[in-house]
Image (cartoon, coloured by chain):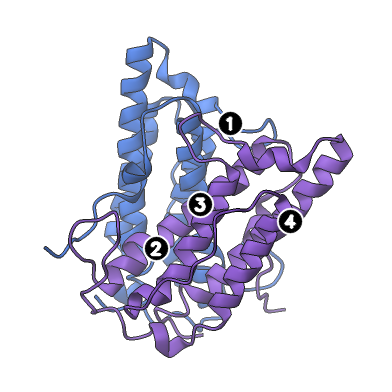
Chain colours: A purple, B blue
Amino acid sequence: MKTSLYTVTIPPFIKALTNLSNCLDKAIIHAEAKKFDPQTLLQSRLAPDQFPLVRQVQLASDAAKSFAARLNGQEVPSIADTEATVEELKGRIAKTIEILNAVKPEDVDGKEDVTNIKLPYLPGMLTGFEYAIGLTIPNFYFHIVTAYAILRHNGVDIGKTDYIGSLDIIA
Amino acid sequence: MKTSLYTVTIPPFIKALTNLSNCLDKAIIHAEAKKFDPQTLLQSRLAPDQFPLVRQVQLASDAAKSFAARLNGQEVPSIADTEATVEELKGRIAKTIEILNAVKPEDVDGKEDVTNIKLPYLPGMLTGFEYAIGLTIPNFYFHIVTAYAILRHNGVDIGKTDYIGSLDIIA
């Protein structure tokens, strides 16, 4: 596999979102075993001034689905932030993966030097490279891992393997 | 900036470790303000069967400092896992950054297709690309973000900006 702006972003994002969706399945199983309503997990958080699980998943989705659109000066694909159940969060992840699957390598590769990446919460502009490597990758993993940590903190039976997922092992 | 296996790993790792060290400074300030011993934070964790802060920082350091060595079939630079204070954890981060600063682009770039990456806990081998993008990047951020989450959970006054750090803004 060649290292390119596409191969270090879109496919790993799809994999991490798939793994997070699997962790949400385990959250449902945990809630059933413990006989609590899995929807309570959506408002769980690690600190009172931190976003809860539902928002962490939405923000991971946003970081991923905005990426190729912003690199190309296009409108960011919109998904309403209305998820109220774990199943709906899994639906948002599935929709996000659909958007990422439609991104072609040529939509991303070679965009390192564009200088017109404007974020709503930042003054000025970023280059494509800074947007990808300085912001999007760490920001995406921030929300994925925080979502994982909230589930873990609530006793969901997940481990590092659920987060990393399967690796291409050479026998 | 060009996208290469080096530019998507070593410089972002240095930046994330620097930001984590700054978060540890804020942990010391928080402990002083609240008049508790900052060393208690080292054993704090989000779940009883999860590694505490000290181990999260060690594992982020390990993921980063192993990377170029393993790509080149060299022995991984060793740092004893003996940190007992926040200052010593900051020292480990500084040592890790020193190791990363000594990595040259040519130590990493072009190693995508090596097929002899052997991890102690994995059967078989990984390619350089799979080791970098499938394992090292998500694993590194996993431990950085979990360390951040543990500090956040303990009331340390840190936010997303402390985690992302400064961005190269075009005026």
Mark 4 element type: helix
Which amino acid type is marked by label 4?
Glu
Residue at x 41% of width, y 86% of height: A107
- Is B159 placed left or right of B139 in the picture? left
Q: Nearer the viewer, mark 2 or mark 1?
A: 2
- Is B109 placed left or right of A64 in the picture? left
Discs 2, 1: same chain: no
Instruction: Check disc 2 and report the residue beneath it.
Output: A136
Mark 1 element type: loop
Chain ID, mark 4: A
Q: Is residue B118 visible?
A: no
Instruction: Check disc 4 and report the residue beneath it.
Output: A87
Q: Earlier in the sequence, mark 2 or mark 3?
A: 2
Dot 3 surroundings within 10 Å: few (below 14), some, or many (20 or more)?
many
Mark 3 element type: helix
Does residue A74 sit above or below A47 in this rendering?
A: below
Callout 1 touching callout 3 (CB < 8 Å): no
Instruction: Check disc 1 and report the residue beneath it.
Output: B45
Q: Nearer the viewer, mark 4 or mark 1?
A: 4
Chain ID, mark 3: A
Cα–Cα gap, marks 2 and 4 = 26 Å
Instruction: Check disc 3 and report the residue beneath it.
Output: A143
Mark 2 element type: helix
Residue at x 19% of width, y 56% of height: A123
Dot 2 surroundings within 10 Å: few (below 14), some, or many (20 or more)?
many
Discs 4, 1: same chain: no
